[in-house]
Image: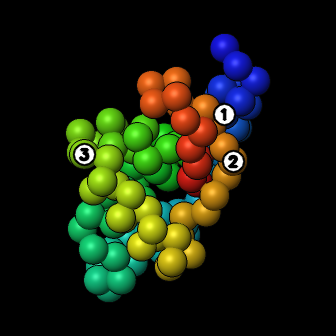
């Protein structure tokens, strides 16, 4: 396993530990974004997958988790980035595509 992969796994574990301690206020804020129609249904699905299920991940990881085509995820990530809800974490070498890709949190 490469250093980048190990770093990503460590980051994911750290984030999972933090998620165990998430407070109700954050959950309420997330629900409010959805209820106020600040997020579309698909944006909410991507954000939930990223924050509550993966912790951090690439577009391909999110797409696989949701069972979607990657193009569907890429657009939602860009929209969520523009809203300041998703940020760049680091680079990750994707062995499946032989490319370095962004990891989001």
Residue found at the far front of this picture: 98
Please report the residue visible at 50 percent of the width from the left and 79 percent of the height from the top. 83
Residue 47: image quadrant is bottom left
Name the element at disc 2: strand
| Relative horizontal placement of residue 44, taking residue 68 as reference (left or right) | right
Q: Earlier in the sequence, mark 2 or mark 1?
A: 1
| Relative horizontal placement of residue 85, taking residue 37 as reference (left or right) | right
Name the element at disc 1: helix
Q: Earlier in the sequence, mark 2 or mark 3?
A: 3
Q: Any mark on residue 90, and which?
A: 2
Q: Front-most of 97 and 74?
A: 97
Considering only vertical position in the picture, is 70 above or below 10?
A: below
Q: Earlier in the sequence, mark 3 or mark 1?
A: 1
| Relative horizontal placement of residue 13, taking residue 33 as reference (left or right) | right
Q: Which residue is mark 3?
A: 69
Mark 2 and mark 3: span between their CA atoms? 22 Å
Could you classify mark 3 by the number of other residues whose Cα lies within 10 Å: few (under 14), some (14-19), or many (20 or more)?
few
Considering only vertical position in the picture, is 99 above or below 58?
A: above
Could you classify mark 1 by the number of other residues whose Cα lies within 10 Å: few (under 14), some (14-19), or many (20 or more)?
some
Q: Quadrant of the N terminus?
A: top right
Q: Position of residue 39 (x, y in %)?
A: 34, 76
Mark 2–mark 1 CB contact (< 8 Å): yes
Q: Which residue is mark 1?
A: 8
């Amino acid at each position: 396993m490469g250093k980048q992969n190990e770093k990503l796994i460590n980051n994911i574990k750290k984030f999972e530990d933090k998620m165990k301690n998430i407070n109700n206020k954050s959950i309420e804020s997330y629900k409010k974004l959805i209820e106020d129609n600040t997020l579309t249904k698909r944006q909410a699905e991507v954000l939930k997958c990223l924050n509550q299920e993966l912790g951090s991940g690439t577009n391909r990881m999110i797409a696989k988790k949701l069972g979607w085509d990657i193009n569907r995820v890429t657009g939602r990530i860009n929209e969520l980035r523009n809203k300041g809800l998703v940020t760049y974490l680091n680079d990750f070498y994707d062995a499946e595509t032989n490319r370095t890709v962004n990891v989001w949190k």
